[in-house]
Amino acid sequence: MKEEVEGIILKETPYSETSKVLQILTKKYGLVSAIAKGASSIKSNLRSLTIPFLYAKFELIYKEGKLSILTGGNIIKLYGEGKSDLKLYAYMSYLCDLSYNVLKENNDKEIFDILKSSLDKLSEKLDYEVIKNIVEFKYLNYLGIEPNFNICHKCHMVKDFYAIDGKIGGFVCHDCFKNERLITPNLLKKMKRFQEVNISEITEIKLTDEEKKLISEFLREYYETFSAVYLNSIKFLDMFKS
Ligand SMILES: [Zn+2]
């Protein structure tokens, strides 16, 4: 039975000579794999519905746990401005890739709203790196590896925070401190806010360049150490770091 499902295309891969397989993050079912038969053909009316970062109401024959079939749809918005802004495109590409990998581990429907609101904020030109970091913080919960910000990760005691290290999983107290990055109570508050904030409600970002760098490096080390999520897109993103 055909139904209309709101979703965002995370990936598209060629299938046979003329078709494509889409990975669509839907509001209703989470991640859905769907075949768009004949979509590579210039004459196909599905062609315009098979572009990465496309947000649309897709008409699908949904098959749980199997390949669904795309039959049509209505475009709501194409994120990414047709690749004209390469840096924006790289961040969107990374976030879609990351979302896909998180969904493979935990097909939680809440991820749709996180990704959609982050793509909206990137389109509004809010700080790309900070939006990416907020999403990365949120996804740690869905990966089941949320950092524990309540204890020192060396002595495992509840103490005042002094420094931070992604490789050991969080904070280090003054007594255990060796060469980790120093952190202020104010920055700690901001990092906790990253986990809680509703992305769609963000209107401005107040972080110093140093704070941004510290959070960014912490998350990268944390993902590399504790998550099996491996992403080539992050390497593409590195080209745009100043
Ligand atoms: Zn300690």
Image: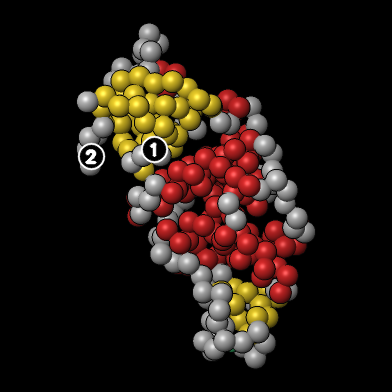
Residue under the image location 42 percent in, 58 percent down: 142
Residue shown at 31% from the left, 17% from the top: 38
- Frontmost residue, 5 versus 23: 5
Q: Position of residue 202 (x, y in %)?
A: 66, 48
Q: Position of residue 83 (x, y in %)?
A: 59, 28
Q: Which mark is residue 64?
A: 2
Q: Nearer the viewer, residue 33 or 109?
A: 109
Q: How is the image coloured?
A: secondary structure
Q: Residue at x 37, y 31 (%)?
A: 5
Beta carbon at label 1 within 8 Å of ligand 1: no
In-image side of 202 versus 150 (left or right): right
User: Any mark on residue 26, and which?
Assistant: 1
Q: Tag 1: Cα neighbours inside 10 Å, few (<14), some, or many (≥20)? A: many
Residue 37 pos. (x, y %): 29, 20
Kind of residue at badge 1:
Thr
Provide the secondary structure element on which disc 1 rests. strand
Left or right: 134, with 111 as reference point:
right
Q: Is residue 13 visible?
A: no
Task: Give above or below for 8 relative to 197.
Answer: above
Q: Quadrant of the N terminus?
A: top left
Q: Between 220 and 33, which is closer to the camera in this rendering?
A: 33
What count of labels does the image hold?
Answer: 2
* Residue, far right: 208
Amino acid, disc 2? Glu
- Residue 147 seen in the current view: yes
Of helix, strand and loop, which one carries label 2?
Answer: loop
Task: Please identify the quarter of the rendering in which residue 178 is found.
Answer: bottom right
- The residue located at (38%, 26%) in the rendering is 58
Q: Relative to 209, is 22 above or below? A: above
